[in-house]
Image: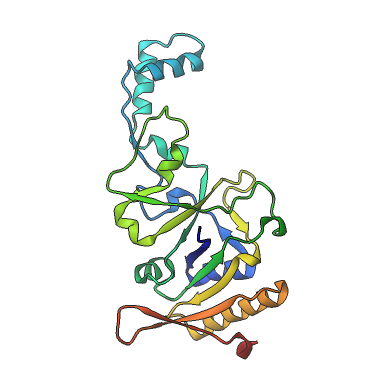
Amino acid sequence: MDWIFYKYSDFEGAKCILTKGTLKFDKPSAFNDPFDCLPANSKVTFDNPELANKLRNQYGREPTLSETMANANNFSRPEYHKINAEDLRVLCLTKNPDNLLMWSHYAGQHKGCCFEFDLRYDFEKSGLNSGDNWVPMAVCYKADRPQLSPFAKGRMKDAILTKSIEWKYEKEWRILRLNNVDSPDNNTVEYPKQFLKCVIIGCNMSPEHKKIIIAAVNKINHDFGVGVKVTQATISEQCYSLNMKDIDLAAHS
C-alpha cells in the first residue's frame, strides 16, 4: 500500500495544521455533499418480522398495531441513517495533490496549501494512545446510492465510504473516528510531526502568507528534528496544470 496522502486546506486551516500541530475531523453534516454518509433507506412495512422482534425487545411485550405502524413510519424516514452518522468524525484525504478543482474548492482558490503526509511512521514512536486511528480507507464511487435496512448491522461503514461517481476525481480516502464526547465541538487531533513531509503553497498565496507558512515549517523542522519540505505551485505557461518547485528553506531561516 502507498501510504502517501494529501490534505488541502485554506490559509487559516493551514496555519492551525502547522502551528497547533492538529488535524480537524469533521462531522458529515458539515460536508459539501448532501448525500455524504446518507445511504438510501429501505422502506419498512408494519408486518416486517425484524421490526416486530425489535419492538418486542424494546417494550418487553407484543406491540400494539398503532405502535407498530408508528415505528414502521419512523424507520422508513429517508433521513433515518443520517442520525446514525452524527457521532462520526471524518478526516478527508486524497491521492491527488495537483487537481485544479480541489485547489479551488478546498484550498481557498489556490491561496491555501496542500499537505503531504506519509502515514507509514512507526506508531510506537509517535506517543499516541493505542485507541488513536491513523489508518485511511478508500472511498468507492458508484452511480447508485447504497441501500441500507434500518435493521442492518455492520454495513454503515460501507455507506460512509461510498460517494457519487461525480466525485471520483477527488480520489478520496478517509480516516474515521468517533466523536470526542468530552469536547464534541473540538474534534482536533494532534498528529505525529514525522507524518508531515511537504507543504505545497498555492499559486495565488500572498507573499505575506507565504512568509508565515515558511516560518512555521522552519520552526517544526527545528523543534522536532524533521525535514519537512516546502514546494511552490505555479501556473504552467502552456497547459491547464500546475508546476511544482522546491523552496530553499535555508534562505528563509
Q: Is residue 50 above or below residue 130?
A: above
Q: Nearer the viewer, residue 124 or 218?
A: 124
Give the quadrant of residue 49: top left
Residue 127's spot in the image, x, y percent?
72, 57
Residue at image coords 42%, 42%: 158
Total numbered labels placed on residues in the image: 0
Q: Residue at position x 31%, y 28% from top?
A: 43
Along the horizontal axis of the image, is 226 left or right of 41?
right
Residue extending furthest toward the bottom:
251
Seen from this angle, which residue lies furthest left? 143
Image coords of residue 248 (percent x, y): 57, 87
Viewer-closest of 10 and 134? 134
Residue 3 sits above or below residue 97 on the image: above
- At a point 38% along the width and 42% down the height, the residue shown is 38
Left or right of residue 44, residue 20 in this image: right
Nearest the viewer among 170 and 8 is 170
Measuring from the top left, give residue 150's x and y in whole percent: 40, 29
Q: Kindly identify the residue that appears in the image at 37 percent across and 30 percent down.
A: 149
Q: How is the image coloured?
A: rainbow
Image position of 200 with respect to 52: above or below: below
